[in-house]
Amino acid sequence: MNTELSDQQLDELLATWPTDNVSLSIDADHVNHFYGTGEMRKQVLFDNVLKVRPGEIVIMTGPSGSGKTTLLTLIGTLRSVQEGSLKVLGQELLGITPTATTELRKRIGFIFQAHNLFESLTAFQNVRMATELLGIPDEVANPKIEATLQRLGLGARIHYRPKALSGGQKQRVAVARGLIHEPGLILADEPTAALDEKSGREVVTIFQELAQQKKCTIVIVTHDNRILDVADRIVSMVDGRIVTNSLIRRNELLSQFLTQIELFRVLNTTALSKIADRFDLRKFESGSEIIRQGSVGREFYVIGAGQVVIEIDGRQVNTLAQGSFFGEMALIHDQPRNATVRALSPVSCFVLDKDDFQKVVQSSSSFEEELRRAIFARL
């Protein structure tokens, strides 16, 4: 099958898919959190799971009181983890010692709505404090601080104190302070809310550069729709729970790939986006067995790259390549696998589990009709 997705785009899609062997910047596993004690104890975070890789820009959205800032402050060690596991830059935060907390904070940049600038210090000196805490020498830090403040539109106010700056200018100083030491992780709460469009765009452009060039992970809590386009991942929270967690670029490319397959072309954009969000990626070495004849069928496969052979009772009956799918028969009829599928080369498959596959079939009569047509044509 020839898809309109270029080899470069397909390589990008496969390369950007989360894998188990990548060291995560944030690894939250069933995190709960409570405020108060005794009868006044109230749960505000519920069983949250979040895995973020180095270099990702994550935007967290949701209504006020949904738990976004609470989760952000847990990640930043500004609150103590109570239940669940939360690893940040490889450090487990549950039970972390004060010394380890201090060391970890040096690797994190904080940008919050409350500017927390020292009124007695100039804009330059406020930013310089961040580099002094890390022992960065003046000859290295000073030119970089000046260049960053100038880029953020504060060239004429580098030596002004906060009382002589507007709210938006103070926010830009806080942004510069949070990113000047090029941390491994930046946590930002509404960093562009007080900024005009030009200044806000400059801030997120710097974020993008840090993510791409330094593999800095950036988590932004925001209601600012102007910056949604920079997100690699959008996480939505409601009532203390992560309800959606979508890798935007990945899903965009996967949706583009799936629309070139006749079976998925019948789905509308909304349905396609939802199903793309549910696919996993699995890689198989040449010669490895992907599914075995007679085994229980639990997954549906779409070949992203490589080639497979179909065998029935040890006899080769077909070969499939990029854009082909297999594994649907056992899911439709709830019967054991009727064939063995083996990788003829290194193979990357997009995988959908049984429940999600059946939801798609049940929700779209066009998809079911196209699926039956494809099965008939294969017989």
Image (spheres, helix red, strand yellow):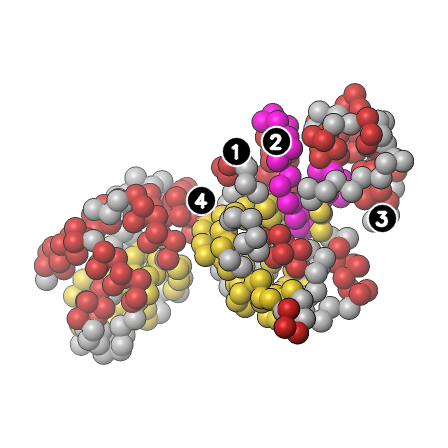
The residue sitting at 33% across, 65% down in the picture is: 353
The one of 66 and 49 positioned closer to us in this rendering: 66
Disc nearer the start of the sequence (1/4): 1
Q: Position of residue 102 (x, y in %)?
A: 79, 59
Q: Position of residue 280 (x, y in %)?
A: 39, 59
Quarter holding residue 129: top right
Other-residue count near label 3 (Cα within 10 Å), few / some / many at <14 / 14–19 / ≥20: few
Q: CA distance from mark 3 to mark 2?
A: 27 Å
Disc nearer the start of the sequence (1/3): 3
Residue 89 versus residue 136 in the image, above or below = below
Other-residue count near label 4 (Cα within 10 Å), few / some / many at <14 / 14–19 / ≥20: some
Secondary element type, mark 3: helix
| Residue at far bottom of view | 294
Q: Position of residue 93 (x, y in %)?
A: 68, 66
Disc 3 marks a residue whose amino acid type is Leu
Q: Is residue 77 left or right of residue 321?
A: right
The residue sitting at 53% across, 59% down in the picture is: 240
Magenta region, residue range: 174-200
Q: Position of residue 324 (x, y in %)?
A: 24, 55
Location of mark 2 (residue): 200
In front: label 1 or label 4: 1
Location of mark 1 (residue): 226
Secondary element type, mark 1: helix
Disc 4 marks a residue whose amino acid type is Arg
Q: CA distance from mark 4 to mark 2?
A: 22 Å
Residue 291 versus residue 324 in the image, above or below = below
Location of mark 3 (residue): 133
Which of the numbered marks, if any, corresponds to residue 249?
4
Whether residue 309 is visible to the viewer of this picture, yes or no, is no
Disc nearer the start of the sequence (3/4): 3
Disc nearer the start of the sequence (4/2): 2
